Image (tube, grey):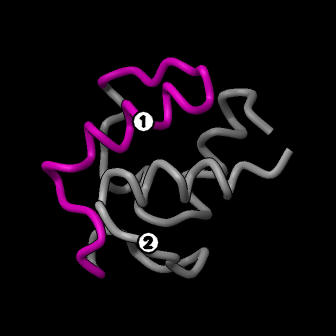
């Protein structure tokens, strides 16, 4: 299963606009997300993909690009 459409759905909901970043584009440096939006983004990912993301993983580094989010979810068993 391709997780990118689900990740984009959550990202667009949190950002409040129809953004489509490149797979390796920084979501934070580009201004699409900020540290205040990170918890909402992670909560949305948990709901969309039925996974539990521990608070200790709430780091902009882990969720900085679509590629990193997809790899993180794959590590959690989401494909």
Q: Is residue 68 left or right of residue 33?
A: right
Q: Identify the residue at horizontal 66%, vertical 50% (top origin).
A: 71
Q: Give the percent coordinates (x, y) of residue 39.
A: 26, 37
Q: Relative to the observer, which residue lies in front, 8 or 73?
A: 8
The residue indicated by pointer 1 is: 44
Mark 1 or mark 2, earlier in chain: 2
Q: Relative to the observer, which residue lies in front, 51 or 44?
A: 44
Q: Is residue 55 above or below residue 44?
A: above
Q: Identify the residue at horizontal 32%, vertical 52% (top origin).
A: 14
**How far apart are labels 1 and 2 at the CA level?**
16 Å
The residue indicated by pointer 2 is: 18
Q: Which residues are magenta?
A: 30-55
The reply to whether the C-beta atoms of the residues labelled 1 and 2 are less than 8 Å apart is no
| Numbered disc total | 2
Q: Give the percent coordinates (x, y) of residue 73.
A: 63, 39
Callout 2: SS? loop
Give me the disc on residue 70: none
């Amino acid at each position: 299963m391709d997780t990118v459409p689900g990740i984009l759905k959550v990202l667009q909901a949190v950002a409040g606009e129809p953004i489509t970043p490149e797979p390796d584009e920084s979501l934070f440096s580009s201004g699409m997300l900020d540290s205040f939006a990170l918890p909402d983004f992670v909560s949305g990912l948990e709901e969309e993909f039925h996974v539990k993301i521990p608070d200790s993983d709430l780091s902009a580094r882990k969720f900085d690009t679509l590629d990193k989010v997809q790899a993180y979810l794959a590590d959690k068993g989401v494909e």
